[in-house]
Image: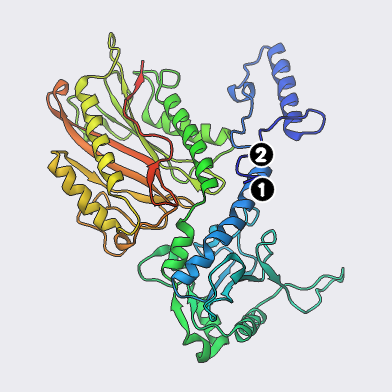
Amino acid sequence: MKNAHPIEYTPRPESDPVSNALIRTARLVVLLTTLGATVPAAAQSTPERPFGTLREQAAMQQAWLRTRLDAFLPALMRKHGIDMWVVPMREYNEDPIFKAITVPQTFAARRRTIYVFFDKCAAAGTPVSATCVERIALGGSSQGGVFEARRSTTPAAGGRDRQAELWGDEQWQLLTSVIEERQPRVIGINRSTVFAFSDGLSSGELAGMSAALGEKWTSKFRNAEGLPAELIAVRLPEEEVFFRRMQELVWSLTQEMFSERVITPGKTRTSDLVWWWRQRVNDLGLDTWFQPSVDVQRKGVKDAELGDDPVIERGDVLHCDVGTTVARLNTDTQHMAYVLREGETDAPQGLQRALAAANALQDITMEEIRPGRTGNEILAASLARMRAQGIDGTLYSHPIGLHGHGSGPLIGLWDHQEGVPGNGDAKVIPSMWFSIELQATTPVPEWGNQGVRMAQEEDAIVDADGRIRWALRRQDRLFLVR
């Protein structure tokens, strides 16, 4: 696809505002140095844009949006037996589906926006295609031409030949007209007692819509359930390529954080690394969807004795849980490191074997994930194989994509290894992504057979053919802090 890769950014000093800012920063550095002042580290560094400008990212996301709605939505509506899908939402009370159907320039619903999707081919049984589904926005914009935007017939106050925006009951009346014209057999609404991603219809919007439509049409309401959940979950091959680049950056940042460039044993605290990560991600113009965490395991010391913010010492095992957000996509990874003692060149063999046990559980889980299986089925099969191999571990993997803890089947929770009713009963589908999250605890001889927990989390892709692979790779060697 044309916009699958952001264009490499090359500043033009004569016109580009970022280049002008860099020139001003350089002049400030020279002035401060001349005056004998200390130059802040931030002023000495050059801003980086690893994924291009926001404008370039937006163009890429716009292409993704149109392709995703064309490629996935018609088939999903037909699969779930819904010929009309109505998704109303109000400003700052957006449905979870919002990020899956709007452009990045749209930060919230506009007053009230009612998105209507209608499969005009369903009644005749015509084979499904992108041209079958009408996409109408009652209120709001066309999202770059993705929707047919309907506006009010009332002229706006203040002249300027502008039409007023739809407002209040006028929106419900227009929705009624849209439905009457199309005579749908089933109207899908986003209401669910199980799946959060399918439960975006607020009680107020349901009441207003029901009052306007009356029994004739409310009798055709059906909880959409799988339709919004799967539309949120599915990803394009173009997004997979971009996701790999995100993973490369995450690995690079994690290895930088878990190195002597950032850690000074006997001085650096775990909170220093947490805020290093937050600041570094922010400096790159990126975001994160959760507060990162860093923790320590130490020979002969219990977790409770380490406290909430221990100083990192030589001989420690380090663990991080970090995420990034770019172009509405999210990563979620956990990696491990070892702080070398004086004279050591590698981690003790016992720690390396402990990581290998976690790798073995990763292999088992990846082999068990395939389309058509539920999260609970995958969990049970994986844990049975894990125990047969003598691994002491737990499995708590989840989908990822537009949300960090994404739409789709849960494969266990850290405190529910017996299965997860409801969310664990959802099925794997092609073109969805997972965070393979788990831990294995192994006695380490060099630590007096103290159990060492190797927690791993790595993002994986189930492709359109149902085959699973790592988005980049998995950690099979501890990072070393020298």
What residue is drawn where x is 87% and y is 68%?
160
Q: Is residue 133 visible?
A: no
Q: Quadrant of residue 41?
A: top right
Mark 2 neighbour class, 10 Å CA radius: few under 14, some 14 to 19, many 20 or more: some
Q: Position of residue 368 (x, y in %)?
A: 27, 49
Q: Specify the farthest residue to the right.
A: 160
Q: In this picture, is 90 found above or below 334?
A: below
Q: Earlier in the sequence, mark 2 or mark 1?
A: 2
- Mark 2 or 1: in front is 1
Q: Is residue 333 left or right of residue 140?
A: left
The quarter in which the C terminus is drawn is top left
Q: Specify the farthest residue to the top.
A: 343
Numbered mark located on residue 59 in the image: 1
What residue is drawn where x is 72% and y is 72%?
165
Work out whether residue 7 or residue 106 is closer to the camera in this orientation and state it: 7
Q: Position of residue 362 (x, y in %)?
A: 28, 40
Mark 1 residue type: Ala
| Tally of marks | 2
Numbered mark located on residue 53 in the image: 2
Distance Cα–Cα, label 2 vs label 1:
10 Å
Mark 1 neighbour class, 10 Å CA radius: few under 14, some 14 to 19, many 20 or more: some
Mark 2 residue type: Thr
What residue is drawn where x is 64% and y is 37%?
52
Q: In this picture, is 161 found above or below 262?
A: below
Q: Position of residue 329 (x, y in %)?
A: 51, 47
Q: Quadrant of residue 120?
A: bottom right
Q: Position of residue 107 (x, y in %)?
A: 61, 56
